[in-house]
Image (tube, helix red, strand yellow):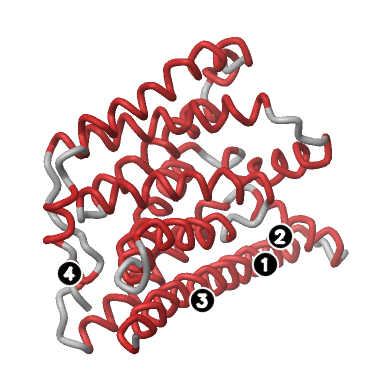
Amino acid sequence: MKERFKNIGRGLGYFGIYFASQLAGSFISSMGFGIYAGYKAARDGVTDSGKIMESTMGLIQNNMGIMVIVSAVLAILTLAIIYKARHEKMSEKINLKPASAKHILAGAGIGTAMYILVVGVLMHLPLSENMLNSYAESANGLFSQSVILAIIGNVIAAPVIEEIIFRGLLFDRFKKAMPVGLAMLLSSVIFGLMHGQIVWVCYATVVGLFLAFIYHKTGSILPGVVAHMFLNGTSTLVNCTKLSAYATEGVFNIALFAAVPAIILIMVFAFRKSRETAEVKVATV
């Protein structure tokens, strides 16, 4: 019983590192944008504090990727320092282990199919106008920035640090303290809640369940990282290019019928014999 509580505490402690890094990254980035906006205002002779604040908020809104990158770097550096001080190998503790080509390809397919599934379902949910507007406003900052920044932040930095924290550390420690299904659910709910906006919270929780399942079956965060990258990458590709003009409800209705069977088939065939191997490979703390 004591060891169970220790593992829950360890998992929450790692989540605390992530949360603190998010706050610190947001603060550092916002301070940087504020200083830059103040410099531009002084250079242009602007003294209106309201306009300076508006300029700062615009910089934040159009450079969300910088906050994501800074926060991810802070979290990884913190983990690296902790494991260095403990004389432990970080790659083993975060379960960054080799994965088969089959599992990597499966992750890529599942990530792409999950994007289609999420968008397709959202199009058919009876969401209020306020909820849709709130969701659109929250998502706008991710795709109003430059494509390069969106790729580095959304497609690389976010999936890497989120899979390290939520699957490689939080879920991994939780499942040592409770039934696997409950550990999947709790870690996925926490993952969803970190996305803030109610629509994001709901579908991020569902996505978290898929990613936790992939990690559980493989014992490595790599397939989940790939799945997460392809989900975010497909979203970024559609929203930051002319493909968004073709992303109509009709197109997603057709794609949706393929996405659900695709996810099921990939999971059945790619991960059906992986459980025993995964359980052996899970590193102890």
Packing grade of label 4 (10 A; few <14, some 14-19, many >=20) is: some
Q: To which residue does mark 1 refer?
A: 34
Tell me the distance, in whole angstroms, between the alpha carbons under discs 3 and 1: 21 Å
Q: Amino acid at mark 3?
A: Ala
Of residues 156 and 230, the one nearer the viewer is 230
- Which is in the foreground here, disc 4 or disc 2? 4
Q: Secondary structure at mark 1?
A: helix
Q: Amino acid at mark 1?
A: Gly
Ranked by sequence position, the earlier of labels 3 and 4 is: 3
Residue 20: mark in rendering: 3
- Which is in the foreground here, disc 3 or disc 4? 4
Packing grade of label 1 (10 A; few <14, some 14-19, many >=20) is: many
Tell me the distance, in whole angstroms, between the alpha carbons under discs 3 and 4: 25 Å
Ranked by sequence position, the earlier of labels 3 and 1 is: 3
Q: Mark 2 near mark 1, Cβ–Cβ under 8 Å?
A: yes
Residue 283: mark in rendering: 4
Q: Mark 3 near mark 1, Cβ–Cβ under 8 Å?
A: no
Q: Secondary structure at mark 4?
A: loop
Q: Amino acid at mark 4?
A: Ala
Q: To which residue does mark 2 refer?
A: 56
> From the viewer's perspective, is 227 left or right of 260?
left
Quarter residue 130 falls in: top right
